[in-house]
Image: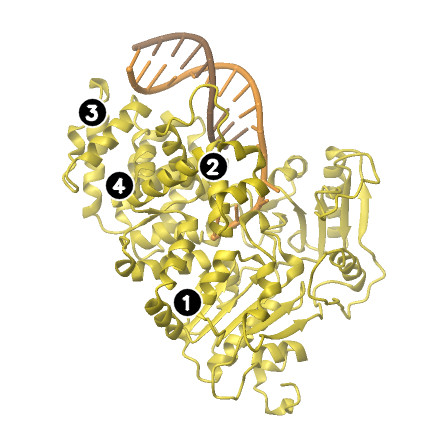
Chain colours: A yellow, B orange, C brown
DNA sequence: CCATATGTATTTTTT
DNA sequence: ATACATATGG
């Protein structure tokens, strides 16, 4: 690969180093689709950039953009790669002629691509194409409903709560392991309920089917089921000449299985990842996928390793390499950088959280004195709640900040309420949405809501007479108004339907919330976002699966020009970079989270914080 | 019986 | 900020 004279290479490849170029052009010039390729890409080694160049190179050699499937881990990564992402404080690294590419539309997360494929193939696998997608909270609510119906919640029983039930179910689905094994290895304290759980899950699955509802796991599960039909598998295999997967170390067994079903011989399949950066095992991701990838094929997949780091200075890499070296099984690689620095990462001990917050603020301000903008600095932490003290301190001292990760716009109650009304109008069988919507009325509680939903389910589909549902007399006027709203929605065009719902909801908000004002602003924001989607169906689907940057990430940004500090969970920070970074709560067992929990050298908890210049 | 007010315990990480 | 359990009021 690298022995061809660089003068013969297209311009856009000249910015890559040898290993990156080998990865980008693997299989080039042979005239046929290349065999399987595994790119092991260390942190900061230009992974995303390399993958984007590989796509560009495939296109330059005549590949059809509509036949390229690019699976990424987050919406941000997909945008970054298709050239749509520009808001990053870090420089945009993808700049190639003809980019973004028109017609290159199959880029997204496994879940969003799954949803798209399933809507298209619904008829052939026996599901309704108008299915509703439940997020985790909705799924939990449905699990709770079923749990109550089966009498598993009652008196003095210590049956697992809905969240735990859902986690167990999800783990079993994503790892494709039997319930007994999942319970034993991951939820041993629930093992005694195995029989009841089995029944619960069966009922949960039935409920989803009856209501035409798919949860996150179903998007993968049905996809896998779909490609187990040889004919559909062949179709999809031909439909996508190239399949490229980013962050492969964070895929789970199910995702690997459906990839292999679509590309059994690995032709046209490229996966990129770093076994040392697997951080989603709690969600069923297994590092085995990337470790075992080459041997799935005969001959084994080609492997290219990117070890040159462009992000950090050598002392930081040395520390990272030390940590990585403790992994039991891994692809050997040694990150290196030309960026020398005499500054080493610092591990700072502080007395408690208050001191930690004060120290970090001092550091941040000192760095700003040194000319590093707040925007070029970040504070990272493992769990969203770890930053509360710091947020208080920042607010007190009038330092602007934006927090990534943690609770999101779309998870706020008022936003969910509005979406529930809309979803229920679109899919009247969706009990969770209906329940939530009906409870919004004053004077109607869980009992009345359940009764109404049962009446509607029992009635002839399409002929459920909403206004005639029995409610208490004093509730009657409000109920009629609500029923009129719902019945009018299908006639409305998009986004008028959402505006109609928002208008009704805003009239209820003063009664429901003490702090209605801020929430009203959110609803108006939601209406603005809605206007950017072409249809209600796409709005509802894509909003749950790919929350737009504007909601989850930038909602709190006052002005683009303004300077602000970045706070982020480590998970949300994946792939981003800053000039100066502080990490909170660096305590044994929390960060790094190594397997053998070495006895702590320092006795104080919450006592560490490190700054990496 | 049913809706709502109050109180108490809890919060990894995300599609 | 929310979820669940319990108490009170219509």
Q: Chain of mark 2?
A: A
Label 2, on which residue?
A: A165
Q: Are marks 2 and 1 in contact (CB under 8 Å)?
A: no
Label 4, on which residue?
A: A429
Mark earlier in primary sequence (4, 2): 2
The percent coordinates of residue A252 (x first, y second) are: 53, 56
Q: Which mark is residue A106?
A: 1
Query: Image point 29% across, 46% down: which residue?
Result: A212
Assign a secondary structure to mark 4: loop
Residue A313 lies in quadrant: bottom right
Marks 4 and 1 on same chain: yes
Question: For this rendering, which residue is in front, A172 or A332?
Answer: A172
Question: For this rendering, which residue is in front, A299 or A27?
Answer: A299
Q: Are marks 4 and 1 in contact (CB under 8 Å)?
A: no
**Label 3 vs label 4, nearer the camera:** 4
Q: CA distance from mark 4 to mark 2?
A: 23 Å
Mark earlier in primary sequence (2, 1): 1
Query: Image point 73% across, 33% down: which residue?
Result: A354
Counting other residues with Cα less than 10 Å from the Cα at mark 1, is it few (<14), some (14-19), or many (20 or more)?
many
């Amino acid at each position: 690969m690298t022995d061809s004279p660089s003068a013969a290479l297209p311009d856009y490849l000249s910015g890559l180093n040898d290993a990156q170029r080998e990865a980008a052009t693997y299989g080039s010039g042979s005239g046929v689709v290349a065999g399987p390729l595994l790119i092991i890409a260390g942190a900061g080694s230009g992974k995303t950039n390399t993958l984007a160049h590989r796509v560009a190179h495939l296109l330059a050699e005549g590949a059809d953009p509509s036949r390229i499937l690019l699976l990424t881990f987050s919406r941000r990564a997909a945008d970054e790669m298709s050239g749509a992402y520009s808001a990053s404080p870090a420089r945009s690294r993808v700049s190639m002629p003809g980019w973004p590419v028109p017609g290159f539309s199959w880029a997204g997360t496994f879940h969003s691509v799954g949803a798209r494929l399933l809507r298209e193939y619904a008829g052939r696998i026996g599901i309704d194409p108008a299915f509703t997608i439940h997020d985790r909270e909705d799924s939990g609510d449905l699990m709770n409903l079923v749990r109550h119906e089966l009498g598993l919640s009652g008196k003095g029983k210590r049956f697992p709560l809905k969240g735990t039930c859902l986690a167990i179910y999800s783990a079993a689905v994503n790892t494709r392991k039997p319930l007994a094994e999942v319970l034993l290895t991951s939820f041993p304290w629930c093992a005694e309920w195995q029989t009841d759980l089995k029944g619960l899950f069966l009922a949960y699955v039935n409920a989803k089917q009856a209501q035409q509802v798919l949860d996150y796991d179903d998007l993968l599960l049905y996809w896998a089921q779909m490609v187990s039909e040889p004919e559909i598998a062949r179709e999809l295999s031909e439909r996508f000449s190239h399949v490229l997967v980013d962050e492969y170390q964070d895929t789970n067994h199910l995702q690997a299985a459906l990839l292999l079903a679509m590309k059994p011989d690995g032709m046209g399949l490229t996966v990129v990842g770093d076994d040392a950066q697997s951080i989603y095992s709690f969600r069923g991701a297994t590092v085995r996928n990337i470790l075992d990838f080459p041997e799935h094929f005969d001959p084994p997949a080609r492997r290219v390793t990117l070890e040159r780091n462009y992000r950090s200075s050598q002392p930081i890499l040395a520390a990272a390499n030390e940590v990585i070296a403790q992994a039991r099984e891994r692809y050997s690689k040694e990150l290196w950088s030309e960026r020398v620095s005499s500054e080493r990462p610092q591990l700072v001990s502080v007395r408690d959280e208050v001191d930690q917050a004060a120290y970090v603020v001092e550091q941040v301000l000192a760095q700003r004195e040194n000319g590093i903008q707040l925007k070029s600095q970040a504070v990272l932490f493992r769990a969203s709640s770890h930053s509360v003290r710091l947020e208080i301190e920042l607010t007190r001292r009038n330092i602007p900040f934006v927090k990534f990760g943690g609770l999101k716009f779309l998870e706020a109650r008022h936003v969910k309420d509005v979406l529930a009304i809309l979803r229920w109008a679109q899919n009247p069988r969706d009990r969770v949405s209906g329940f939530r919507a009906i409870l919004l009325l004053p004077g109607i509680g869980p009992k009345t809501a359940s009764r109404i939903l049962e009446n509607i389910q029992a009635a002839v589909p399409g002929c459920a007479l909403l206004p005639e549902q029995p409610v208490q007399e004093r509730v009657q006027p409000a109920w009629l108004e609500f029923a009129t709203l719902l019945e009018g929605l299908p006639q409305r065009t998009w986004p008028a339907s959402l505006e109609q719902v928002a208008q009704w909801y805003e009239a209820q908000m003063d009664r429901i919330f003490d702090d209605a004002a801020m929430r009203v602003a959110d609803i108006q924001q939601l209406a603005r976002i809605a206007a950017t989607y072409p249809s209600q169906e796409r709005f509802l689907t894509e909003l749950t699966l790919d929350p737009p940057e504007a909601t989850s990430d930038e909602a709190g940004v006052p002005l683009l020009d303004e300077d602000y500090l970045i706070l982020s969970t480590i998970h949300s920070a994946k792939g981003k970079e800053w000039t100066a970074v502080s990490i909170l709560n660096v305590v044994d067992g929390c960060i790094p989270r190594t397997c053998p929990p070495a006895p702590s050298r320092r006795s104080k908890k919450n006592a560490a914080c490190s700054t990496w210049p």
